[in-house]
Image (cartoon, grey):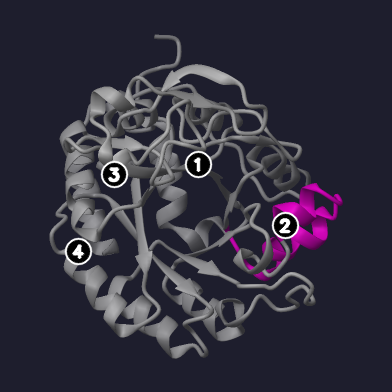
Amino acid sequence: MKAQLLALATLSLMSTPAWSQESRVDEILDRLRNANQHRDHVMVVAHRGSLWKDGEIVEAENSIASIERSVRLGVEIVELDVQKTSDGRFVILHDETLDRTTTCKGAIAEKTFAEARECRLVVEGTGETTAETVPTLEEAYDAIRGRILMNVDIKLGVEELAEVIEIAHDMGVDRQIVTKNRTGTSAEIEAARATLARIPSEAIFMPILDDRDIKDVEPIRAVYEAFQPEAVEVLNRWKAGTPLTDDGGVNFSMDAKALAAANDTHIWINTLFQGGDANIAGGRGDPLAVGPGATHEGWGFWVTAGATIVQTDEPEAMVAYLQSIGARKPYKTDDTQRAGKPAAE
């Protein structure tokens, strides 16, 4: 995977004007593709866009506004969800229904695109109705162009992923796309490989390693051999009321971290606001870091454990915390650049 991407990137640079070769996206991709050179910098992913501030939701999720805020905050990746209307248009939406996040009701798969565009996004925290409607996939791609990477969390069958990436390729933003899929079993590895075989593009694939599926290092080794990934997304399941993780589980074992180093790969942890059995950061996530203010016991634990990418619902606080402990390096390129053009244009 990395060798293929290097060849594609080289060809791209040969045909790209010199003024666009040092864009912010190039800098982010360099840090993503060369983990061992940049382990002193923790990359930040804004979950469903930059929504939260100090425990409160301040933007509509999966909105263009949340992408813009992510860019302003300086995070590297924005995670967005993809659904499809009844007439085949891809839209940015998490749930199968419009009920929670818009002024409309009903299943998105039963709405035409025109009907979905009549819906206004709602800020879940305040109930405020925004002027923004449900974004199209193309609008999201245009918003990230030359500025930030996008982690596509497709809520459809894997067969739809190829078309989502094809649209990115046609729009010239496929190198900014990170896709992902569960790869904890040999069957999941083969399914992911079959899907990737249908996607000849620069999009980056990231395996997901859930510690419910993985009991020792061998399945992790199989994932590295199959994909040579730039990053692996790891989940450390935790039940409310039990002790916080003290070692990060098998995905943060010495053997697992040695594999990450040997393969020049980032370890990505999610610290999202998820309660009960759904918590995926060993209890050491956003609720601990932002709620009680136990930042070092929450986020600091994962930085010390070896995570170099963190997906969070609190990107503003996360960036500030990482800067305070010296775990962020500045970028040379202005965050406001679009499509490689100088910010002043």
198 left or right, relative to 226: left
Q: Earlier in the sequence, mark 1 or mark 2?
A: 1
Q: What kind of residue is marked 1?
A: Arg
Identify the secondary structure beneath mark 4.
helix
* Mark 3 and mark 4 residues within 8 Å of each other at the beta carbon: no
200 left or right, relative to 178: left
| Magenta span contains residue 140 | no
Q: Is residue 167 above or below residue 342?
A: below
| Residue 175 numbered tag | 3
* Mark 4 and mark 1 residues within 8 Å of each other at the beta carbon: no
Q: Is residue 221 above or below residue 289?
A: below
| Residue 97 numbered tag | none
Rate crowding at label 4 as few (under 14), some (14 to 19) or many (20 or more) other CA atoms within 10 Å.
some
| Magenta span contains residue 307 | yes
Q: CA distance from mark 4 to mark 1?
A: 24 Å
Q: Earlier in the sequence, mark 1 or mark 3?
A: 1
> Which contiguous range is marked in magenta?
285-308
| Residue 195 numbered tag | 4
Q: Tell me which residue sits at (17%, 38%) in the image.
A: 88
Q: Earlier in the sequence, mark 3 or mark 4?
A: 3
Q: Which residue is mark 1?
A: 48
Q: Quadrant of residue 144?
A: top left
Q: Which residue is mark 2?
A: 299
